Image: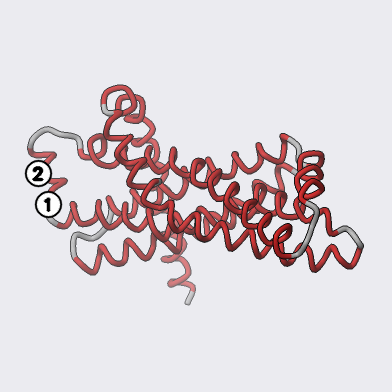
Amino acid sequence: MLRDIYDALLGFVRTFGAFQLFILRLLRHTPHVLLRRFPLVVKQVYNAGSLSLIIIMVSGVFVGGVLGLQGFDILTIFNAEDAVGVFAAFGLIKELSPVVTALLFAGRAGTALASEIGLMKATDQLSAMEMMAVNPVRRVVVPRFIGGVIAMPLLVAIFSAVGLLGAHLVAVSLLGVDVGAFWQQMQLTLEMEDVVEGITKSVVFGFVASAIAVFEGYNAIPTAEGVGRATTRTVVITAISVLVLDFMITAFLI
């Protein structure tokens, strides 16, 4: 049993070290890609962001609606129904929007990135690029990584806006909360530090989710089973990383 624990810890350290070295390779090629290959980045922002809008907006509406219902039910006890907007705004902007968007991003865009790069490796497309003196990391991996990092904060902002709209529809239209009080108390209570916290989390989660997706795809075993495992690991590792980082960032900023 001790031998198994030792092997597991050693494998984790090796993988984590390889992941850090891989991030350094991505960062080294990022300036060149942004300056010379920017159309590729724009295309990947579209693939990672625009194609995820439907699931982000639908999820945002219902998450905001649930916050409106729960907030109204809880605040009624204290005769503070007009503060539903504050309840929804804090819940969305500081916590739910970055976390839920990152999880949805991992399930939709992250798996697409990992499977696409893994399939290119399985079909020897990356090896063919190396034979033609083309760096596959610079040409294939880095644009997808940058596109995911840029798309995540934009998706989080859309999720927050749509979520507040969903909370407004439920609280004001269905439950009869005064519309002026709903928005005014939100504006008076919400501070810039709260918005910055949400932005910080979205950038960090976008960086981590995109890096994990391209790392797993690039290092996938070049078989159908290996690509499938890489896709599964992308979702699992991203979900755990996002939740752990969410706790760490929140504890640091409070």
The reply to whether dot 1 and dot 2 touch (C-beta < 8 Å) is yes
Q: Nearer the viewer, residue 215 or 195?
A: 195
- Quarter of the picture containing the C terminus is top right
Residue 205 image label: none
x 62%, y 57%: residue? 166
Disc 2 marks a residue whose amino acid type is: Ala
x 59%, y 44%: residue? 201
Disc 1 marks a residue whose amino acid type is: Asp
The percent coordinates of residue 183 (x first, y second) are 75, 45
Q: Nearer the viewer, residue 25 or 46?
A: 46
The percent coordinates of residue 248 (x first, y second) are 65, 49
Which image quadrant for residue 108? bottom left
Mark 1: give few (<14), some (14-19) or many (20+) Cα within 10 Å: few
* Tag 2 residue: 128
Please give left or right for residue 30 compared with residue 62 in the image: left
Asked if residue 18 shows in the view, the reply is no
Q: Nearer the viewer, residue 151 or 133?
A: 151
x 82%, y 66%: residue? 74
x 48%, y 69%: residue? 5
How many numbered markers are drawn?
2
Please give left or right for residue 201 compared with residue 118 in the image: right
Numbered disc 2: secondary structure = helix
Please give left or right for residue 143 compared with residue 179 in the image: left
Residue 15 higher or lower than 200, as above or below? below
Which image quadrant for residue 173? bottom right
* Tag 1 residue: 124
Residue 234 higher or lower than 19, as above or below? below
Q: Nearer the viewer, residue 86 or 32?
A: 86
